Image: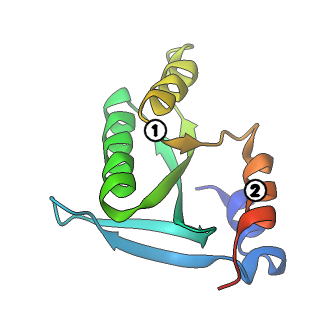
Amino acid sequence: MFPGIDSILRSPKFSAKMKYDETVTLPLSGKKFKVPYSYVNGRTNLIKPETIKSFDSAEKLAAEGEIIKHKLDSQLIVIPKITMPDPDAVKNICEFFNIMNVQYYTEDTVDALYAKIEREAHAV
């Protein structure tokens, strides 16, 4: 789904700082929440590349991010691939993630996430 991101985050440059294919149980619902990447910088950061096909799926992901933040003391980081035909969809969903305090990096800004991981992540 996100081959470039996968090859970078699984490269030797990052492998000593990353955990892969993590599953956490969401409090309240008991739902299993899977992420392909995570790292720790004082708190656990769960990285989830996600294809977003509707505003409803963005809302659900943001709600899960809030639960992760407040109940698990972790941070959800979304790398969205927004496939909605609405020309304002990217702007609206990114604004929504900001309102819900969910960190996100688009394809245009994902290099900043790589730099942050290099700078802040603790070895595993």
The foreground one among 10 and 39 is: 39
Q: Where is residue 95 in the image (x, y as percent from the top left)?
A: 52, 23
The foreground one among 84 and 106 is: 106
Q: Which amino acid does label 2 sit on?
A: Lys
Indicate which disc, 2 or 1, sits on the residue closer to the N terminus: 1
Q: Looking at the image, do the residues carrying marks 2 and 1 touch, with CB atoms under 8 Å apart?
A: no
The foreground one among 22 and 83 is: 22
Residue to which mark 1 is pinned: 52
Q: Which amino acid does label 1 sit on?
A: Ile
The foreground one among 78 and 70 is: 70
Q: Position of residue 12 (x, y in %)?
A: 82, 81
Residue plotted at (48% across, 33% down)? 97
Estimate the spatial distance between the alpha carbons at disc 2 and disc 1, rounded to whole Å.
24 Å
Closest to the camera, between mark 2 and mark 1, is 2
| Left or right position of 123 against 40 | right
Q: Where is residue 48 in the image (x, y as percent from the top left)?
A: 52, 56
Colouring of the image: rainbow
To which quarter of the image does residue 3 belong? bottom right
Looking at the rendering, in which quadrant would you find the C terminus?
bottom right
Q: Residue furthest top?
A: 87
Q: What element carries label 2?
A: helix
| Left or right position of 68 against 44 | left
Name the disc covering residue 116, or none. Answer: 2
